[in-house]
Image (cartoon, rainbow, N blue to C red):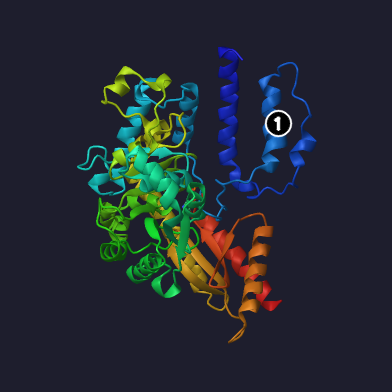
Amino acid sequence: MDSQGFREAANATIDEIITYFDTLATRNVVSAVEPGYLRKLLPSEPPQDGEPWADIQKDIEAKIMPGITHWSHPGFHAFFPCATSYPSILGELYSSALSGACFNWICSPAVTELETVVLDWLAKTLGLPACFLSTGPTRGGGVIQGSASEAVLTAMVAARDKELSEEEREERVMVKRSRMVALATTLTHSSAKKAALILGVRFRAVRVREEDGYALTRERLAEALAECRAQGLEPFFLAATLGTTDVCSVDDFDGISRALAEHAAPPGQPGEVWVHVDAAYAGAALVCPEVQEATKIALISRFHSFDMNMHKWLLVNFDASCFFVRNRDWLVQALSVNQAVYGNKASDGGLVTDYREWQIPLGRRFRSLKIWFVMRSYGVKGLQEYIRRTIKMGEDLAESLRSRSDLFEIVTGPKFALTVFRLAAKSEGAPLEERNALTRALYEKVNATGKIWLTSTELDGRFAIRLMTGVRTTEKEHVDTAVKTLVEIAEEVMKG
Ligand code: PLP
């Protein structure tokens, strides 16, 4: 493809993408293909001669679209959103044109420097304490990771190896690993457990309860720490959450600090517990000052790291997981492994950031560009407006469900645009199994319409439906459709 060919192909592609978004609501949300559908549609060998773009592009609609589940569909109420927006797509375009493995500053100074600047912008916008800024008092800073799972793994490595020399590190890792415990809760995302598995350390999930709003409290953490100590185990890491996946609960940051002050070593001492705040989804809502206040985000200045995915609820395409640490030296000490081929004057002079030392992979893409484009195109006010609009739709939806208490019972929320609910009891004292079966029937019938997509969870044995209203394209009319569909099918299930 030459320059002129690219110009024509790119124009045709952009046109098709715009039409896709403009007509998205007319499609079903979830792909209905059978496993293996694509192999039947594609030749078993690659073409020997190159094909014209027009032929390739045709196959997007004919062969790929049937197998696409539309995460930007206004009826997508499942999981959490996976964002996209036009400015972000433009960022991806430039990023792929300026392709490079920008692991060191010299590999493209703009890639490193823009990342540092936009992550400082983001930290300020989210109201993070100054210790997480690259210009803050504690040598903090942010780095873009591929996912929240990568971020928690990175934080856990740094916590495990923090302030150890290479020999001590080996001693600790090899000998003490059998006693090291990473703590989380029963509602912490599974990525924390996976990180512990990868690092070969123990993992304990503290049970969170309905009466505590499914949050980790001072008492529960204190009990868990005491239990570990009694068993001769060494808690070294705690994954706290701002917005759990199932119900969007927020752990009690003040309670966590107090429990650690009473039951763990002081900061900087052996036995200190690294606290990582996973705000993968709900962290986006911190763009609103009222959310910063409600979640007491200022209290995380006592913690070690924080991560949020702009690619979930903040209009930036996957992948843009923004990971902040209170002291970047912790990452560099844990992850810096030198190899002669990567040495250069700028790095050796110690004046630049080489982000390869803050992450697991070596190479890295120009991901800050799409963040820069989105923050400049929307402005902080635009981001706030979007988050507030989606939160309000969640509140309106919950209100509609509440007004039909004959059909629905809210289990948690609305919180951060997520409402968790189940079918009301058909009769007083209806057994749990019956309510679960009826709620499941509602859930499956609604999803079978293809018009909206919901996900479910289970809380203390109760099957419940999650409905999220955070997708960029979702408007009031789509939420009204969701309510109407739920009411109609709930009435049918109740009668049946
Ligand atoms: N943490 C929370 C609270 C999540 O909800 C999720 C995914 O939804 C993750 C972590 C994992 O995110 P990622 O896919 O970026 O690893």
**At 47% across and 34% down in the image, what residue appears?**
361
> Looking at the picture, does residue 372 appear above or below residue 412?
above
Number of numbered tags placed on the structure image? 1
Residue 8 image point, x, y percent: 59, 19
Q: Is residue 22 visible?
A: yes
Front-most of 139 and 427?
Answer: 139
Q: Is residue 363 left or right of residue 117?
A: right
Q: Is residue 346 left or right of residue 65?
A: left
> Looking at the picture, does residue 160 appear above or below residue 494?
above
Front-most of 401 and 312?
Answer: 312
- The N terminus sits in image quarter: top right
Extreme residue in the left direction? 137
Query: Which quadrant holds residue 372?
Result: top left
**At 62% across and 73% down in the image, what residue appears?**
436
Query: Which quadrant holds residue 102?
Result: top left
Q: Is residue 5 left or right of residue 214?
A: right
Q: Is residue 280 visible?
A: no
Residue 392 image point, x, y percent: 41, 59
Residue 56 image point, x, y percent: 69, 25
The amino acid type of the residue labelled 1 equals Asp
Near mark 1 (Cα within 10 A), the count class, few <14, some 14-19 or many ≥20, is: few
What residue does disc 1 label?
Answer: 59
**At 69% across and 19% down in the image, what residue appears?**
52
Residue 430 image point, x, y percent: 61, 84
